[in-house]
Amino acid sequence: MNGAESLIRTAAAAGVEVCFANPGTTEMPLVAALDAADGMRAVLGLFEGVCTGAADGYARMSGKPALTLLHLGPGFANGIANLHNARRARSPVVNLIGDHATWHAAADAPLASDIHSLARPVSGWIRSVQSAKTAARDTAEAIAAAGAFPGQIATLIVPSDCQWDPADAPARPAPLAGLAKVGDAAVKQAAEALGAGPGAGLLLGAAALSERGLSVVARIAAKTQCRLICETFPARVERGAGMPALERLPYFPEQAIEALTPLQTIVLAGARSPVAFFGYPKMPSSLVPEGRKVVALAEHGNDALAALEALAEAIGAPRAVSLPAKATRPGRPSGKLNAATVGAALAAFIPENAIVMDEAATTGLPFFAASSNAPRHSYLALTGGAIGQGLPCATGAAVACPDRRVIAFQADGSGMYTQQAFWTQAREQLNVTTLLCNNHSYRILQVELARAGVTEPGRKAKSLTELSNPDIDWTRLARSMGIPGVRVEEAESLCKELERALATPGPSIIELML
């Protein structure tokens, strides 16, 4: 047995079932080990950002880490943006990065780089394997580190000689770290804040947005009448019939501050105190209105579920609450395609138990409200703001949940970052339906130009925010990678094609001309 074989067998024994890979020369022993490993699925991505984004989507839906297999520092660098998103989502991911043989490092070969420095900003745990005989133990510890609550990125750098040299038996799985328990004082402070009368809100993130978490949140709201607000870009939230309705904290700071102004107290449960995505002139970084009190019941590293359950007991919340169990859908929209009609169409036809990965940017905003009481579904968002997450994340979610329909609600500009995900969806025959919103622009940047006072952008400014000349034909692009699709130009056609696509196994694309 060599180091690569001991590494892969250790990962399989620890319950890791998938490796999203874009390997190179230095990873060939690991490729051979994957070939020989039972129970480990290997999924090829044609760009490293697809691999890392898919590992994020897989982790969000399965709760378990996947492996990525990446080629040296430059390959890892290609995947960093979606690891940034995965870190913000608190997703457990284990990166395996091949490196030059230890005895070749001093040669400073053309592909040599400082992988540690590249990995540090997105990794909660980093290690370089020192010999083939430690590869198995290092792998077990990497998997345990990634799985430690609430989830993080673990990066293991594996020199090629540590892959091919002889090794011992696989290592046993390493124990996971325990959850950080919330103290009684935090629970008491939150109970007092919510019991002080109207004007309190729960800002929810992480596990608080799970089915179990929201069931407790509904009980707390029934007792206190507090407002329920979720993060602007949640990693995962369970939505639809039987779940409490949530407000979503607006993206733009003026709107977020306005939404929070009626509150006197904001209780954090699985979420950080909200801040603006960007610094704007004469606008604060914090979105908490002046004079409001922020109470941290459970921050992102704490056990938010246990904290919410303790809070429900402390305030005497009812043991159960009745929420509308019957789904309601908006009517079939008609007329021009725009954000409102697209959101209504998706809410009207979303299948029971679907997964929606939303990177539709400006077009996607109305869907969240339209689908509040739709059939039950999981909703995933662009957690870290690094665009190009949508198509890979949907791909990984489909690998994790092959029996569920995944809907990639995707903007055209960000979709071009990682459109290689279509090829993986076709090869793996994944049940992903992509709604591609084609407005031929980086619309959010046009909005930001207007917000900056540029109401009449010049030729160069326009050229940097328009995706035209030439226009991108998404249907033909996807078809070239094995994905069937159609182009629609009005809401009636969208409804017809959406109904058909969602009932057809395998991947497809509907290009929406906005």
Image (cartoon, rainbow, N blue to C red):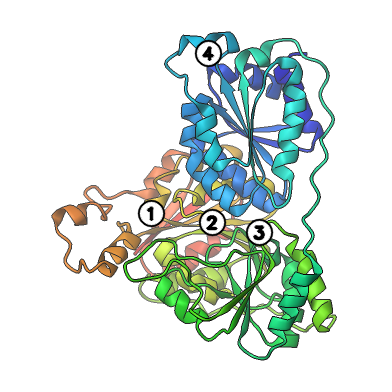
User: Residue 241, image x and y in percent?
Assistant: 68, 76
Element under disc 1? helix
Q: CA distance from mark 1 to mark 4?
A: 42 Å
- Nearest the eye: 511 or 447: 447
Query: Is there a contact, CB below 8 Å, between mark 1 and mark 4?
Result: no
**Residue 69 location, quadrant:** top right
Looking at the image, which residue sits at the far left?
Answer: 459
Q: Amino acid at mark 4?
A: Ala
Residue 169 in the image: x percent, y percent? 83, 19
Q: CA distance from mark 2 to mark 3?
A: 14 Å
Q: Residue drawn 80% across and 43% down? A: 176
Q: Which residue is mark 2?
A: 383
Residue at the disc numbered 4 = 105
Which of disc 4 and disc 2 is earlier in sequence? 4
Mark 2 or mark 3, earlier in chain: 3
N-terminal-most mark, 1 or 4: 4
Percent of width and height locating residue 16: 74, 37
Label 1, label 2: how far apart the Cα atoms are = 18 Å
Q: Which is closer to the viewer, label 2 or label 3?
A: 3
Q: Is residue 85 visible?
A: yes
Q: Residue furthest bottom?
A: 197
Q: Which residue is mark 3?
A: 300
Q: Which callout, 3 or 4, points at the residue further toward the start of the chain?
A: 4
* Disc 2: CA contacts within 10 A as few (<14), some (14-19) or many (>=20): many
Q: Nearer the viewer, mark 2 or mark 4?
A: 4
Judged from the image, the secondary structure of the residue bearing numbered disc 3 is: loop
Label 3 crowd bin: few (<14), some (14–19), many (20+), radius 10 Å:
some
Amino acid at pointer 2: Thr
Vertical relation: 95 (above or below) 211: above
Q: Residue at point 38% right, 45% down?
A: 476
Asked whether residue 425 is in view, the answer is: no
**How far, Cα to Cα, is label 3 from label 4?**
39 Å
